[in-house]
Image (spheres, grey):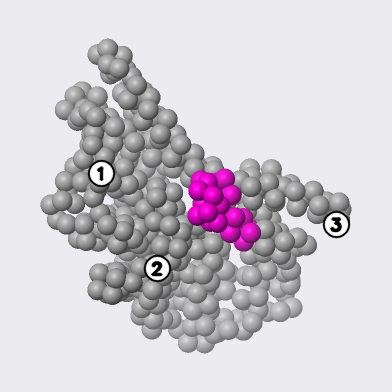
């Protein structure tokens, strides 16, 4: 059941003011390219300022601050668990990049003489299978770079290929807590065990497969030119394989620790970071080469972490004031299935992190099947529009002028077809077969 509010501050000056600040701040988040402002800045401002305003309201009216303090402490714990989890995951990704793992992968792909269609399917498949272990944004950025390196001028190959990578990365992240922030949020909120999210694999996989098949019809025949003489061979650095295995071990420890020891997942991740640190000491002694993990940490996308902190704080403020009760009322009005399907379309327009955060905070009374549905739709729904997901925005930046809102919308119907198929498969699996 959803939590009962202790107070309702929606019709007070602080309730209206915080809501206005949230809407205004989110406008700047949504239009960050127009105003050339990193979305972490307005997110951090509205998140922290909202609670300061609530604190002022409590002080002016002589209210007992205990409920406010309790909510803030609970919020800090929720954010910290995901914050440190992402920090370790990003550090591992940066370490893999530094060891040349992805550069070696890129060289192998472009040097094999594959056709455009084969490269289209290989990059899409890699996006689908890498994103559950890494994350959808990093996966999409790396593989879109590979795509662009293959042929910088063939628009008929690049645009369908870019859409395929975005859709595959988001679909791959939807069934793994390690692949998408929204799935991670649902997992850490206790909406399912790790293995429960794997049940979303059929819906996510076949939804991407349909979109990929439809897009492949527009991929040109032939193969890109590759000059062996002018392109230097790229090899993975020493220690690259060790970092890969340590990353896999870290994920395993985090999952098993969460299941059997009931530890927060970030505890296992932090232990994995300690193992990585110990390995660098061993590597330096054996290979006389220093792998500076702290340099890799400095490359972590801190703006993503700060955006995450800010937006969850802002949503927490709206929840405390009572605004999110309207989310629950909406679900009661239209039903959870249609509400969760609509979440996918909302996630395409608004960032899926605040949408998922609002739903988790509102905590409408839904069964396990519906929590899996909203996790999936929030994850894959962002693919419907080019800027609807972090992966899409990242690829737009990497392939500026090629993969755009307009070029994406030309093929958006293929993404919609995949989205609908994913929902149909979910319904058949969860509602009819009860197989989850």
Q: Main secondary structure of the magenta part?
A: helix
Q: Is residue 314 left or right of residue 132?
A: left
| Residue under the image location 52 percent in, 87 percent down | 222
Q: Earlier in the sequence, mark 1 or mark 2?
A: 1
| Residue under the image location 39 percent in, 50 percent down | 190
Q: Earlier in the sequence, mark 1 or mark 3?
A: 1
Spatial distance from mark 3 to mark 2, Cα to Cα?
43 Å
Dot 1 surroundings within 10 Å: few (below 14), some, or many (20 or more)? few
The residue labelled by disc 1 is: 2
Q: How many marks?
A: 3
Q: Earlier in the sequence, mark 3 or mark 2?
A: 2
Query: Which residue reaches farthest bottom?
Result: 222
Q: Is residue 226 left or right of residue 83?
A: right
Give the image location of residue 363, x and y in percent. Answer: 28, 46
Label 2 sits on a secondary structure element that is loop
Spatial distance from mark 1 to mark 3, Cα to Cα?
56 Å
Q: Nearer the viewer, residue 370 or 261?
A: 261
Spatial distance from mark 1 to mark 2, Cα to Cα?
24 Å
3 or 2: mark nearer the eye: 2
| Residue under the image location 49 percent in, 83 percent down | 117
The residue labelled by disc 2 is: 199
Dot 2 surroundings within 10 Å: few (below 14), some, or many (20 or more)? some
Q: Nearer the viewer, residue 262 or 232?
A: 262
Q: Is residue 397 left or right of residue 277?
A: left
User: Quadrant of the rendered structure where residue 242 is?
Assistant: bottom right
Q: Which residues are magenta?
A: 247-269
Give the image location of residue 433, x and y in percent. Answer: 28, 75
Q: Are marks 1 and 3 in contact (CB under 8 Å)?
A: no
């Amino acid at each position: 059941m959803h939590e009962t509010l202790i107070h309702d501050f929606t019709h007070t000056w602080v309730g209206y003011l915080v809501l206005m600040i949230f809407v205004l701040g989110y406008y700047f988040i949504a239009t960050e390219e127009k105003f050339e402002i990193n979305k972490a800045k307005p997110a951090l401002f509205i998140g922290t300022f909202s609670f300061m305003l609530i604190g002022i309201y409590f002080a002016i009216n002589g209210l007992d601050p205990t409920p406010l303090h309790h909510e803030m402490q609970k919020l800090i714990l929720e954010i910290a668990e995901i914050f440190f989890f992402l920090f370790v995951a990003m550090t591992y990704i940066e370490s893999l990049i530094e060891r040349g793992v992805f550069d070696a992968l890129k060289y192998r792909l472009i040097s094999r003489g594959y056709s455009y269609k084969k490269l289209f399917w290989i990059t899409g498949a890699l996006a689908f299978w890498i994103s559950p272990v890494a994350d959808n944004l990093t996966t999409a950025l790396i593989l879109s770079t590979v795509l662009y390196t293959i042929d910088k001028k063939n628009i008929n190959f690049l645009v369908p290929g870019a859409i395929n990578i975005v859709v595959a990365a988001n679909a791959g992240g939807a069934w793994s807590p390690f692949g998408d922030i929204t799935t991670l949020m649902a997992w850490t909120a206790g909406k399912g065990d790790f293995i429960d999210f794997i049940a979303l694999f059929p819906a996510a996989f076949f939804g991407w497969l349909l979109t990929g098949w439809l897009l492949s019809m527009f991929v040109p025949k032939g193969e890109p030119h590759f000059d062996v003489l002018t392109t230097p061979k790229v090899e993975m650095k020493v220690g690259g394989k060790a970092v890969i295995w340590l990353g896999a071990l870290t994920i395993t420890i985090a999952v098993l620790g969460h299941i059997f020891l009931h530890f927060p997942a970030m505890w296992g991740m932090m232990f994995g970071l300690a193992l990585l640190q110990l390995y660098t000491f061993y590597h330096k002694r054996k290979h006389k080469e220093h792998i500076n993990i702290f340099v890799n940490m400095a490359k972590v996308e801190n703006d993503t972490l700060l955006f995450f902190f800010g937006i969850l704080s802002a949503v927490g403020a709206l929840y405390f004031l009572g605004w999110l009760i309207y989310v629950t009322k909406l679900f009661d009005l239209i039903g959870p299935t249609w509400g969760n399907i609509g979440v996918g379309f909302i996630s395409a327009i608004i960032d899926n992190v605040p949408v998922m955060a609002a739903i988790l905070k509102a905590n409408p009374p839904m069964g396990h099947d519906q929590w899996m549905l909203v996790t999936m739709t929030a994850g894959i729904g962002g693919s419907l529009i080019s800027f609807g997901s972090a992966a899409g925005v990242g690829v737009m930046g990497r392939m500026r002028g090629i993969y755009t809102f307009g070029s994406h919308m030309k093929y958006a119907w293929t993404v919609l077809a995949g989205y609908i198929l994913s929902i149909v498969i979910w319904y058949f699996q969860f509602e009819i077969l009860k197989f989850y």
